[in-house]
Image (cartoon, rainbow, N blue to C red):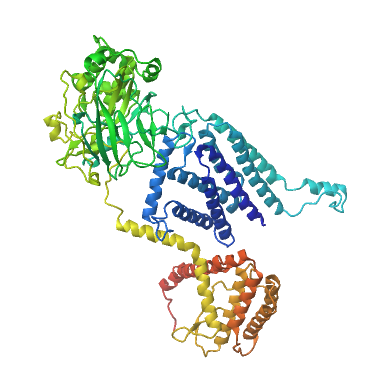
């Protein structure tokens, strides 16, 4: 194996060994086998293209193109053109998978399930690192810098993994890098020639001369490689240790309860309010779901997605929780006493296909959920979470839930919450400004119990404190945003709910923030439509005997809970009808407008509700036709680039064989090649008639040039310094041709000498047959790889580049001569006076 071949093999092994450090992050580990196969194809393409005399950048481009095609075939084959070409739909599919993978990374704790998005990120990352390593170490022959992408791959894995087997992965990654450095050092030393030492290799000059030669051995590359390798390995040890200890999903370590395995492990969700403000400002209240319910109080039918229960001073986010299988009947709500009146209702919900959420919107507290697909249950928040890529898109499900109807007296007489719950849900960061607690104490002054304090906080934001609803303010949720909100008194549901929850915690009341949808808008057919602007956030406070209880501090949004008012509305319970299939796909007839919305806000169009958390409404009508055509043409061009040498070689062979066989193109003229053997112009030449004296020369030289290029394609480079006879001997010897093929080469060489040096050139017969015989002999003596290489990436195709360079040089020469100073000076020179 050649030195470059060893380097390519070591680059492949080093990348795969470093990629093994990602194995503890996901399960199962079968993705590594798929990544290894695709990486082998990528490296094989680089080895194939490097055998041709092409620029290094073209090698990297070919590998990148093959990588894109491989990812398209594996992850977007149904959307690809002809199942292979990465068209616009395939690119959109890959982009969607990457976005889904990024969301999964932030949601799952290690070891996370291998969803399609995570698998694309893993395999795509390995292929990207492999491409960089192969380009640096093999294409550009610099193995030491190739340790940087390997270091990045290992450092990311080591920083994310919370296990105790990091040393094993470090040794694998380090071993791969050292193997790469060793291969490069051996390749560099081989370029200096063989180094002799010892008695058998002692030079005749004696010990002194031998010592001098031994001292001049080329050890500098090895020494440099060792130093760089030691430095890189040292950094690899220090970087993971220096990474901060982070918490959360897989992206931030395991977090609490991450040891559970199977069916999705644990979960830590990405903050669902990232795009809330953008969706609040959408002009159209596009429908995301519809439902039918037999609730007697539909105005209180909130659809809850999840609860944010951790406040670190910069944001509210959900905790990492262990997931379980969905039970047939969900457990009783935490803290709910039998003395509190409850009514069980049934609802049928249909989600739009444009709405994709990992969390399933449910009325709180749900007691039974009937839904198809892969879903898991998180007991603390009583939420259902999609497993292995499952989302709410187009979901239809049936939910039984409780309408909890506490009285003001029951809430006021609630006892203290359990110590563990109180400790977790009253925790506030040290960075929370004192003004928050001071304001909470001032607002709730005179309250006799936690219930009265909660009602006072709600009324302070909703009506008494002079706050106004405004979606154009900064959407921050940290301590600074809360302080600014209390000062400026402008914000939307995010600010109202988060600030009330933080204030309640400073008062010792357990609190968290729920995210979901307000009840929506009733339709003429009896169903209820929930739109983008119906999404909402509200605080939930815990009262022993009642459990987690909803409050509504946001003015003009949602409904005020009846247990915070004197009059408690009641209603009858009916049996709900199943929502029509596909009905949720159409937009609502009008935006959701609460009855409590002031007339001025109605005129300004501000009486909708919030937008679907984490969901962007579709705002375009599709990819423009021009973009589609451009992408398709670009893909065709990129895919055709590696085939250009093959296509040119086929065309050149066809024309030469036609000429050597005496066949003429339409018009009766043939292109006679140049008579110089060193010509780089390929088949260029002037046109000649079939009966012209140059006809014999054109036919013979076409056959000889085809034999020369065929031998070149099989690894025998042309030597223009030799005579045709010597060149024929060289082709026979290096090509290991049989008797028939050898005789054919010598016949064509003799014909070349005859047409070049005889007084009157004559036409030889059987030239095309001799060329075919030589080509068959070269293919027979060559190995399988050499035969494929001669067809797919012929070396003689470099003549195209030489011809283009010659033409460019000729063009620039003519242009320079045309605009030369002497030429214009001759034209403008005044004629001299003539005597006589």
Picture quarter with the C terminus:
bottom left
Which of these two is toward me, 820 or 708? 708
Where residue 558 appears, as percent x and y from the top left, is 21, 29
Asked if residue 460 lies left or right of residue 121, the reply is: left
Which of these two is toward me, 479 or 124? 124
- The answer to which image quadrant residue 166 occupies is top right
- The answer to which image quadrant residue 542 occupies is top left
| 425, above or below 61, in the image | above
- The answer to which image quadrant residue 349 occupies is top left
Where residue 567 appears, as percent x and y from the top left, is 15, 20
Asked if residue 462 lies left or right of residue 6, the reply is: left
| 363, above or below 623, in the image | above
| 203, above or below 741, in the image | above
Asked if residue 245 lies left or right of residue 11, the reply is: left
Which of these two is toward me, 408 or 44? 408
Q: Is residue 818 visible?
A: yes
């Amino acid at each position: 194996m050649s030195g470059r071949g060893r380097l390519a093999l070591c680059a492949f092994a080093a990348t795969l060994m470093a990629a093994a450090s990602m194995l503890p992050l996901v399960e199962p580990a079968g993705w590594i086998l798929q990544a290894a196969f695709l990486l082998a194809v990528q490296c094989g393409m680089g080895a194939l293209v490097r055998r041709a005399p092409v620029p290094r950048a073209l090698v990297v481009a070919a590998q990148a193109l093959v990588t894109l095609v491989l990812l398209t075939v594996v992850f977007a084959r149904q959307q690809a053109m002809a199942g292979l070409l990465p068209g616009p739909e395939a690119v959109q599919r890959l982009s969607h998978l990457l976005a889904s993978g990024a969301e999964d990374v932030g949601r799952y704790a290690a070891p996370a399930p291998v969803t399609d998005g995570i698998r694309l990120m893993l395999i795509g990352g390995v292929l990207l690192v492999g491409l960089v390593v192969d380009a640096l170490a093999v294409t550009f022959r610099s193995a030491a810098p190739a340790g940087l992408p390997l270091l990045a791959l290992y450092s990311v894995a080591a920083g994310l993994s919370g296990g105790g087997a990091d040393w094993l992965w470090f040794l694998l990654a380090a071993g791969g890098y050292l193997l790469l450095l060793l291969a490069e050092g051996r390749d560099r030393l081989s370029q200096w020639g063989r180094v002799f030492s010892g008695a058998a290799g002692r030079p005749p000059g004696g010990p002194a001369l031998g010592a001098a030669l031994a001292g001049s051995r080329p050890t500098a590359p090895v020494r440099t490689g060792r130093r760089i390798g030691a430095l890189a390995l040292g950094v690899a040890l220090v970087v993971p240790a220096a990474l901060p200890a982070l918490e959360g999903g897989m992206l931030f370590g395991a977090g609490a309860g991450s040891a559970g395995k199977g069916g999705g492990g644990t979960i830590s969700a990405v903050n669902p309010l990232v795009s809330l403000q953008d969706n609040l400002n959408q002009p159209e209240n596009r429908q995301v779901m519809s439902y039918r319910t037999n609730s007697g109080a539909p105005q209180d039918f909130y659809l809850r997605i999840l609860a944010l229960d951790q406040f670190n001073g910069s944001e509210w986010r959900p905790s990492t929780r262990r997931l379980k299988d969905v039970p047939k009947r969900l457990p009783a709500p935490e803290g709910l006493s039998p003395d509190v009146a409850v009514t069980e209702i049934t609802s049928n919900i249909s989600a739009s296909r444009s709405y994709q959420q990992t969390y399933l919107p449910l009325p709180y507290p749900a007691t039974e959920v009937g839904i198809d697909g892969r879903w898991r249950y998180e007991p603390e928040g009583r939420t259902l979470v999609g497993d292995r890529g499952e989302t709410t898109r187009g979901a239809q499900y049936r939910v039984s839930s409780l309408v909890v109807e506490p009285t003001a007296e029951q809430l006021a007489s609630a006892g203290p919450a359990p110590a563990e719950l109180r400790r977790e849900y009253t925790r506030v960061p040290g960075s929370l400004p004192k003004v928050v607690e001071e304001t909470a104490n001032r607002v709730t002054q005179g309250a006799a119990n936690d219930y009265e304090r909660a009602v006072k906080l709600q009324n302070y934001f909703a009506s008494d404190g002079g706050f106004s609803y405004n979606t154009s303010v900064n959407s921050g949720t940290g301590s600074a945003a809360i302080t600014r909100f209390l000062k400026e008194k402008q914000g939307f549901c995010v600010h109202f709910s988060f600030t009330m929850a933080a204030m309640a915690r400073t008062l010792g009341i357990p609190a968290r923030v729920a995210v979901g949808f307000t009840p929506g808008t009733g339709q003429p057919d009896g169903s209820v439509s929930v739109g983008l602007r119906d999404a909402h956030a509200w605080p939930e406070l815990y009262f022993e005997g009642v459990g987690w209880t909803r409050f509504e501090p946001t003015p003009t949004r949602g409904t005020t809970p009846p247990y915070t008012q004197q009059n408690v509305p009641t209603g009858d319970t009916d049996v709900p009808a199943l929502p029509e299939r596909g009905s949720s796909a159409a937009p609502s007839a009008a935006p959701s407008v609460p009855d409590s919305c002031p007339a001025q806000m109605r005129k300004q169009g501000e009486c909708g509700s919030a937008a679907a958390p984490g969901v962007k409404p579709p705002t375009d009508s599709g990819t423009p036709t021009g973009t589609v055509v451009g992408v398709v043409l670009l893909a065709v061009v990129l895919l055709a680039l590696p085939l250009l040498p093959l296509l040119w070689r086929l065309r050149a062979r066809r024309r030469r064989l036609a000429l050597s066989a005496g066949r003429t193109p339409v018009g009766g003229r043939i292109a006679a090649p140049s008579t110089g053997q060193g010509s780089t112009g390929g088949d260029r030449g002037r046109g000649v008639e079939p009966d012209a004296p140059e006809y014999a020369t054109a036919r013979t030289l076409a056959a000889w040039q085809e034999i020369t290029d065929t031998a070149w394609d099989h690894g025998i480079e042309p030597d223009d310094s030799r005579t045709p006879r010597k060149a024929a001997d060289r082709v026979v010897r290096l090509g290991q041709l049989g008797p028939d093929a050898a005789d054919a080469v010598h016949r064509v060489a003799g014909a070349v000498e005859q047409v070049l040096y005889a007084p009157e050139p004559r036409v030889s017969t059987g030239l095309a047959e001799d060329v075919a015989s030589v080509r068959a002999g070269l293919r027979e003596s060559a190995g399988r790889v050499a035969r494929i290489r001669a067809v797919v990436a012929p070396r003689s195709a470099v003549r195209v580049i030489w011809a283009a360079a010659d033409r460019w040089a000729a063009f620039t020469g003519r242009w320079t001569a045309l605009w030369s100073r002497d030429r214009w000076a001759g034209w403008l020179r005044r004629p001299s006076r003539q005597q006589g």
